[in-house]
Image (cartoon, rainbow, N blue to C red):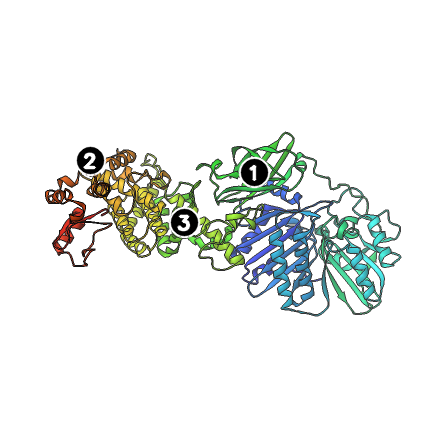
């Protein structure tokens, strides 16, 4: 047998996706070896399907911190047995390869044990690749398995089938699955097609005599060569070798003895069936047990996967040497006796709406107490209702302190009386997010945790400068819908990718700007959701607290010097950044995001140009149509600038609001405020008091509207305060006192350059007066008054 390394296969190509199936699962080993190797090859989508036993193993491994972030783990609970296949599928745009073997995702399975492995590809093994596609397609709909990776399995099955259809087949390799039919039944059918079975040899770490006798009977053979390993892995009691079968003969298979077996415990599962017209060699996950070989199809217990190689050379057989039966093993594989085996398994995903999850295994209670463990820190989230195994934890329970990080692992624990369920929380498509964010990711995560430094701010300034397209992503504000009159991109994650996969409605909408359907669309949506969250955090980030400086600490002095250097670079580069971002603003979403970015930089670094930049943002707002959210944000900005002016002028601020179509008498939503700006621009002032003063102020435009309404009603207002101060008031008053048909007055929404009645141009001096004071006199048709600036 040839030696083959799965790590060599990973390193041989630039893969895009990797999918694994396993029974046992060592998360620490997987992260240290496999995930690292895959990330080096550019793999951004790593998924592991594991038996609940493997999932529970990972829950105990506190040192494994990448679960749910750089790779996803889905438990698959086989109702009558275990989920037992050991498979690796590597996908690239131009190639698909797979390995089917006996080794789990553990150090033993990939290094210490003696395992058997088959390499499958469509170049000569198209039927085997097609069989793998059918396996995942069947797993997607299997009623004998409980899992939440059905959509993933269906999509993978389709891709594998497509790869097979484009390949060629030499007729030598197939893949057998116990989901389709019992493995023993499929072996008997294959042997019959090869002229009938004549001999049977088996190597396996676990056995039961009934399975050996049943398989031999199905094949029509009278005896079985059963390999006696020189080094054994622990097996359950009385399952280390088939002593109770009368038809077995103890042998050493020479090929296995030559594989350094003295140092490596046998975990490989291999069967050779000698036939009249050749031989069959099966290897994979199925042990020589009833659960592995005899049960399948509708009566499946273990989900197994094996390759079947057809050798049509007549007379070829394994060489073996007769030996004595092995002694009973001194150490048996004991069942896990702790309470963890009684713990139910849950799966959950974090989206902008909160955490959505499902309990896969036994659960009875209608509600449970929830504890979230975030990077080993337990956080009490109160109670949650559970219906048909499904539950949701709304974002309101995840305050700023507990907002889910994209670094480290997140676990949930649900407890109700004696019922306990545990599982990981997955952040969808983190690999794609990491690839898109690049070197800026640590800085973006620092902002989300409120731990940014000037160096982070500098890195993010460069990221925004080179990725201005993020300005078109709108952060979704909790408990609010979008307020703009324009169509909005949807930053929500596709929840069907992970977690329950049951959410519908608005969450299933596509998002504007998706690069395509399928995985590309999912990655784009995940990226937009991450950017939306990042922008939302930028709008509330505060300056990092500074400790008292320790002059004797060199590292502290060096850190402060780096921070000071970064702050200097920020001040120098900020004007150029603003110019580049301002050039992108053509809708109110981009305007609001520019305001968030500039606010973040100015507040976290206390930049002296803050007031000037805020004024320039308001000038940008004059050239675009503002939705209600944008109007509220600009209202706050106007209030901040008014509070920070050398002389507070509430009427002028009110006029600025009117010019932007903002109702100054309506209080803006405080979720759209840009906190921290007023503390820097006008320290010691209260923005709410400023807004109240603006609401109480009167402008000439308020008087114009009041005057128009009164004249239309045949009355004259007695509450005008601004118009009577205008230099042209006496002449205007004279016109107001005339009969309606004889008045020379016209009202317009905004300043104009020509008379609306006759289209004659207004003299330049009068046009300027109208624009600056709201009132002018045209020679043709008298006074022109504007309702808004």
Q: CA distance from mark 1 to mark 3?
A: 29 Å
x, y percentage for residue 11? 56, 60
**CA neighbours of label 3 inside 10 A, class few (<14), some (14 to 19), many (20+):** many
Q: Is residue 465 left or right of residue 1?
A: left
Q: Which residue is mark 2?
A: 719
Residue 437's disc number: none
Q: Nearer the viewer, mark 1 or mark 2?
A: 2
The mark nearer the N terminus, 1 or 3, is 1
Identify the mark nearer the N-term, 2 or 3.
3
Q: Nearer the viewer, residue 405 or 223?
A: 405
Screen quadrant of the N terminus: bottom right
**What separation in Å lies between label 2 and label 3 (alpha carbons)?**
43 Å
Label 2 sits on a secondary structure element that is loop
Mark 1 or mark 2: whose residue is earlier in sequence? 1
Q: Residues within 10 Å of mark 1 (few under 14, many from 20)?
A: many
Relative vertical location of residue 650 with respect to residue 530 in this rendering, above or below: above
The residue identified by callout 3 is: 474
Q: Quadrant of residue 154?
A: bottom right
Q: Can residue 36 be seen from the camera position used here?
A: yes
Q: Nearer the viewer, mark 2 or mark 3?
A: 2
| Mark 2: few/some/many CA within 10 Å (<14, 14-19, 20+) | few
Which quadrant of the view contains residue 88? bottom right
Q: Is residue 42 visible?
A: no
> What residue does disc 1 label?
412
Residue at x 53%, y 57% (from the top left corner): 519
């Amino acid at each position: 047998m040839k030696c083959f390394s799965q790590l060599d296969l990973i390193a041989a190509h630039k893969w895009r996706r990797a999918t694994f199936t396993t029974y046992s699962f060592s998360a620490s080993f997987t992260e240290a070896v496999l995930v690292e190797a895959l990330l080096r090859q550019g793999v951004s989508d790593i998924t592991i399907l594991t038996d609940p036993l493997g999932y529970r193993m990972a829950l105990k491994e506190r040192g494994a911190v990448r679960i749910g972030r750089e790779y996803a783990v889905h438990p698959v609970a086989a109702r009558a047995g275990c989920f037992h296949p050991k498979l690796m599928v590597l996908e690239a745009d131009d190639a698909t390869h797979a390995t089917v073997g006996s080794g789990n995702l553990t150090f033993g399975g990939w290094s210490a044990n003696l395992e058997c492995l088959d390499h499958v590809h469509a170049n000569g093994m198209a039927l085997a690749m097609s069989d793998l596609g059918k396996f995942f397609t069947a797993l997607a709909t299997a009623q004998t398995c409980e899992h939440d990776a059905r959509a993933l399995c269906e999509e993978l099955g389709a891709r594998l089938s497509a790869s097979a259809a484009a390949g060629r087949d030499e007729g030598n390799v197939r893949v057998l699955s116990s989901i389709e039919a019992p493995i023993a039944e499929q072996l008997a059918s294959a042997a019959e097609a090869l002229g009938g079975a004549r001999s049977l040899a088996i190597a396996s770490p676990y056995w039961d005599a009934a399975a050996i006798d049943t398989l031999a009977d199905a094949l029509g053979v009278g005896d079985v060569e059963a390999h006696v390993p020189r080094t054994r892995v622990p097996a359950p009691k009385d399952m280390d070798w088939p002593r109770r079968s009368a038809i077995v003969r103890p042998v050493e298979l020479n090929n296995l003895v030559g594989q350094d077996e003295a140092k490596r415990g046998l975990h490989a599962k291999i069967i050779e069936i000698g036939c009249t017209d050749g031989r069959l060699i099966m290897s994979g996950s199925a042990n020589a047990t009833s659960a592995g070989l005899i049960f399948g199809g509708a009566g499946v217990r273990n989900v197994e996967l094996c390759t079947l190689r057809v050798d049509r050379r007549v007379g070829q057989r394994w060489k073996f040497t007769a030996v004595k039966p092995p002694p009973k093993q001194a150490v048996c594989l004991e069942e896990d006796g702790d309470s963890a085996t009684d713990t139910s398994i849950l799966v959950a995903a974090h989206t902008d709406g909160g955490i959505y999850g499902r309990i896969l295994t036994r659960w009875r209670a209608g509600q449970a107490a929830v504890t979230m463990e975030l990077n080993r820190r337990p956080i009490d989230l109160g109670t949650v209702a559970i219906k048909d195994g499904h539950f949701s934890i709304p974002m309101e329970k995840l305050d700023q302190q507990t907002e889910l990080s994209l670094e480290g692992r997140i676990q949930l624990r649900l407890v109700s009386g004696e019922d306990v369920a545990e599982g990981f929380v997955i952040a969808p498509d983190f690999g794609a997010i990491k690839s898109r964010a690049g070197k800026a990711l640590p800085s973006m995560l620092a902002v989300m945790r409120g731990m940014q430094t000037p160096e982070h701010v500098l890195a993010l300034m460069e990221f925004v400068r080179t990725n201005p397209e993020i300005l078109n992503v709108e952060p979704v504000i909790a408990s609010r819908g979008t307020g703009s009159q324009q169509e909005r991109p949807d930053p929500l994650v596709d929840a069907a990718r992970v977690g329950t996969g049951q959410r519908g409605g608005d969450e299933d909408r596509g998002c504007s700007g998706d690069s395509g359907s399928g995985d590309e669309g999912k990655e784009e949506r995940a990226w937009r959701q991450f950017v939306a969250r990042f922008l939302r955090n930028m709008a509330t980030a505060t300056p990092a607290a500074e400790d008292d400086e320790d002059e004797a600490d060199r590292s502290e002095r060096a850190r402060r010097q780096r921070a000071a250097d970064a702050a200097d670079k920020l001040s120098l580069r900020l004007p150029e950044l603003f110019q580049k971002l301002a050039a992108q603003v053509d809708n109110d979403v981009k305007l609001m995001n520019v305001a968030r970015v500039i606010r973040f930089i100015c507040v976290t670094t206390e930049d002296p140009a803050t007031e000037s930049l805020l004024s320039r943002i308001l000038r940008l707002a004059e050239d675009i149509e503002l939705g209600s959210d944008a109007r509220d944000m600009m209202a706050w900005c106007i209030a901040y600038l008014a509070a920070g002016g050398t002389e507070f002028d509430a009427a002028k601020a009110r006029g600025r609001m009117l010019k932007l179509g903002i109702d100054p008498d309506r209080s803006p939503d405080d979720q759209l405020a840009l906190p921290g700006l007023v503390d820097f621009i006008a320290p010691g002032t209260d923005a709410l008091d400023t807004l109240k003063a603006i609401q109480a102020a009167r402008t000439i435009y308020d008087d114009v509207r009041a005057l128009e309404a009164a004249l239309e009603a045949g009355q004259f207002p007695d509450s005008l305060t601004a118009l009577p101060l205008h230099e042209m008031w006496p002449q205007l008053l004279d016109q107001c006192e005339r009969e309606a048909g004889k008045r020379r007055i016209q009202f317009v929404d905004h300043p104009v350059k020509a008379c609306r009645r006759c289209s004659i141009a207004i003299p330049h001096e009068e046009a300027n007066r109208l624009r600056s004071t709201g009132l002018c006199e045209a020679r043709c048709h008298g006074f022109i008054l504007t309702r808004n600036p």
